[in-house]
Image: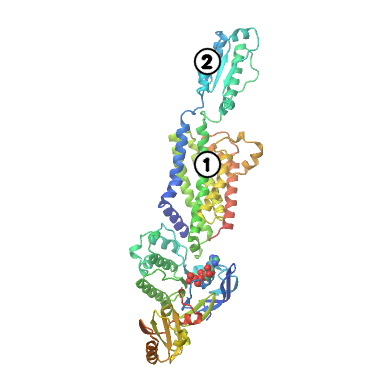
Amino acid sequence: MRPLIEISDLTKSYGSLHAVRGVSFAVAEGEIFGMLGPNGAGKTTTVEIIEGLRDRDGGRVSVFGLDPAKAGSEVKGRTGVQLQQVALYPRLRVREVICLFASFYDRQANPDELISLLGLEERRNARVGELSGGQAQRLSVALAVVNVPELLFLDEPSTGMDPQARRNLWDVIRGFKADGMTIVLTTHYMEEAERLCDRVAVMDYGKIIALDTPRNLVHEHFEQDAIEFSSTMDWSISELRGLDFVSSATAQGSEYSLFSTNVPGTMGHLLKFSDAKGLSIDGMRVRHATLEDVFLKLTGRTLRD
Amino acid sequence: MNSVVQLFLTNFREFVRDRQALFWTIAFPIVFVGIFGIVLGGGDEGASYDIGLVIEDDSQEATVFAAILEEFDAFEISRGLAVDELEQLQEGKRSAVVQVPRGFGSALRTGTPQSLQIHYDASQLTTQQVIIPVLLRALDVADRAITQTRPVITAEFRTLQAEKLGYVDFVMPGLIAMSVMNTGVFGAIQMVSLRERRVLRRLSATPLSVWKLVGADLAFKVVVLLVSTAILIVTAVLVAKVKINVENLPSLAAVVVLGGAAFLAIGFFLGAFAKTEQGFFAIAQIVTFPMLFLSGVFFPLDGMPDWIRPLITALPLTYLTDAVRQLMVGGAPINAMSINVVVLVVFLVGFLGLAGRFFKYE
Ligand SMILES: Nc1ncnc2c1ncn2[C@@H]1O[C@H](COP(=O)(O)OP(=O)(O)OP(=O)(O)O)[C@@H](O)[C@H]1O
Ligand SMILES: [Mg+2]
């Protein structure tokens, strides 16, 4: 079966700034495809070119077998879009704006069901301009699915949401997938990508630097668990790397991480080492490697820097 | 179709929930027209002028002359001594003073040509343009009556209007045309603001067509225009006592809709080149302001120099003002009604096409 989205060698510059520098990937029907990357990586630019909202400089894009730059309205009728920047008629009420957007499509979801799905019942008669950031974000997700799209784009959907709202949103998105939607989602939150996405593309400086299932990405780069500790003192990274069983060591300010093939063995050595050097350790924990670590390893930077 | 209805409703809701928009489109023009009405409504009505008459000759001819002058409706004659009347003229209480010198009657009887003195304030334009010609005609009539020469050619003047018209009747239709222009051109600011706030960008992610978006906006603005114009006309009739042709109201409504749509199309076109609301405001001001003076809103166009005429004929407001004035109060037409209508249709279609061509979602 043909993938729903196929892009190859996509490029886009804004003046001298190369925002997207040769991106290729395919999204299969029914999957949740994640794009993870720091600010300015080119996620929004890539996604909006696929949506037909921006022109591209080069490369091929095919959505439902059509080029969105040419067959715009056919593609738009079958897709749902949540833009990173929410912008709506400020004096309209929540239910009114949902009915307005529904009227643009042949296929229409029930507005009241959408309102309760996204937990906006209490705000159904509130003016859009008076919604809180998280509520506006939920309305924006509701508007993206007013046409029960086959393909749904969510650009940082959980921005501004509290942890509970974020978890609820994840359930809602899993529900969309269960209903057969194909979803492309961008995020800064590795937890969101890990929990929600079937596959994740890690993007940095306009390029995809890794693309796989979250589990494979982590296992490909880390066979070990991490020991993390904080310390206000100066540790030498190269000396830390020299400790037994340590495969890699990184420092982010006062946070240190050691990846080890033998966690108890490394811990013993670490404590002896700190005693000998007179260095203090403020807190220590052990955790599994995450996409965040993958990103740090690949780029030398964290996702939100 | 449903989407057009929904967009229309959206425009309506955004409008009535926006106090500022309500003020500028409904309240402000009423206040404006109301003030004009109050200022002009009194003295100017029926256009009659105070003329001082100084008779220094006690002959029968002088009496006849005075009686003839008094018969002119346009004049409010007050008699007095030369010193008093000239002082009144100085103070602006007379538009002109006519002085009949001693020996006027006897001179006429012997057939000697006689001259009268007419004092006026040369800085007063109305006096020069209106009163002097009428006075000369009055003198002519008096001359013939007194010297008993039979006039060979007579002219009977009949105005197009049943009643006499004053400046207020001239300017009110102009103000209404101006308000239609402003509601139209500045009405496009909503579209600019939607673009600036990136709402249009969100709409562009849906299959909605530009024409439905623009069409719904146009339809809503036409309704606003009809309501605000109706309120203006009522204000003009009540406050300024403007006499209107009631049987022309349906055609007037049609012309207002046509003109408003044409100006809105011009606004949409201008809006395509503005990034921000303020930017649009500046462009729209530059385009509308000169038209106020070159399209016969406040002054008749007869006095305009020849070199500016091509510009006048190129301005859409010229045609709308003329059409509204003809329909409201009659009045001397600049163009035949059909020309006004055709020109406005051309502006509407042309600028709507251009607006669609240059329309930008962001
Ligand atoms: N319209 C534009 N004009 C000029 N530069 C732009 C424009 N849009 C994006 N850029 C630049 O292109 C780069 C990529 O931007 P993009 O919005 O695609 O990043 P992103 O990965 O979505 O970032 P974020 O996580 O902050 O949303 C950035 O450096 C940005 O400044
Ligand atoms: Mg982005």
- Kindly identify which residue carries mark 1: B177
> Which disc number belongs to residue A110?
none
Three-letter code, disc 1: Ala
Coordinates of residue A254 in the picture (x, y in percent): 41, 78
Which residue corresponds to the image point at 57% horizontal and 43% vertical from the top-left? B291
B356 versus A82 height, above or below: above
Coordinates of residue B83 in the picture (x, y in percent): 52, 15
Coordinates of residue B81 in the picture (x, y in percent): 51, 13
Task: Using the rendered view, name the quadrant where residue B60 is placed.
Answer: top right
- Kindly identify which residue carries mark 2: B83
Can you name the residue that lies furthest to the left here?
Answer: A122
**Chain for numbered disc 1:** B
Q: Is mark 2 within 8 Å of ligand 1?
A: no
Residue B96 visible in image:
yes
A4 versus B269 height, above or below: below
Q: Distance of mark 1 from mark 2, alpha carbons?
A: 47 Å
B26 versus A4 height, above or below: above
Residue A74 visible in image:
no
A48 versus A283 height, above or below: above
Q: Secondary structure at mark 1?
A: helix
Asked if residue A175 lies left or right of residue A209, the reply is left
Numbered disc total: 2
